[in-house]
Image (spheres, rainbow, N blue to C red):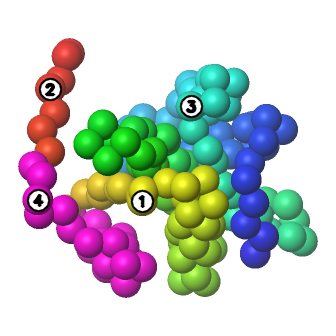
Amino acid sequence: MKIRQANYKDVSKISSVFDEYRQFYGQATNITGANRFLQDRMEHGQSIIFVAEDPNSGEIAGFTQLYPVFSSISMQRSYILNDLYVKNQFRKQGIAKQLIAEAKTFTKTNSGKGLELSTSAHNKEARALYQNEGFEQETEFLTYFWKSV
């Protein structure tokens, strides 16, 4: 499996996988919206997307998307690993680990403080993967969210 940073030409291929990911989390399918969302992120330099691409077929097997954020306290950049998804037929092949490794390398190369992520409390497989990959559950800070709608 080839892991690489996505570019504008990849958006249409990533959109279907991104839509599957959103459906996994209970959202209605919306390929047009997925395509527009990803295009906007790339056009405005708001996210970094890595894809796992089958070298034989060119099919996108999975992806991860990072969002840059900044810490005032440490005065450093970090990245939020907001999305990580591997299509069903490509699971159990270590692709998620490869995508995480690429995200870690990118973070180090770009002098990032680290990677932050969150996942559903019910997603036991993802939680186990993240712990095995060296992520630790945050205990120092509590996270709150204000919903505007």
The residue indicated by pointer 3 is: 46
Instruction: Point out the stretch of residues depicted in magenta.
Output: 122-142
Residue 76 seen in the figure: yes
Q: Name the residue rendered at 18%, 62% in the picture.
A: 138
Q: Quadrant of residue 55?
A: bottom right
Q: Type of residue at label 1?
A: Gly
The residue indicated by pointer 1 is: 114
Mark 3 or mark 4, whichever is nearer to me? 4
Q: Position of residue 7 (x, y in %)?
A: 78, 42
Mark 1 or mark 3, whichever is nearer to me? 1
Q: Identify the disc placed on residue 140.
A: 4
Q: CA distance from mark 3 to mark 4?
A: 27 Å
Mark 4 or mark 2, whichever is nearer to me? 4
Q: Type of residue at label 4?
A: Glu
Please say if the residues under marks 4 and 2 sit with CB atoms less than 8 Å apart.
no
Mark positioned earlier in the residue sequence (1 or 3): 3
Above or below residue 99? Residue 34 is above
Mark positioned earlier in the residue sequence (4 or 1): 1
Most foreground residue, 31 or 14: 14
Left or right: 106 with respect to 118?
right
Q: Position of residue 121 (x, y in %)?
A: 19, 62
Above or below residue 4? Residue 11 is above
The residue indicated by pointer 2 is: 146
- Disc 1, SS: loop
Q: Is residue 125 magenta?
A: yes
Mark 1 neighbour density, 10 Å: few (under 14) some (14–19) many (20 or more): some
- Disc 2, SS: loop
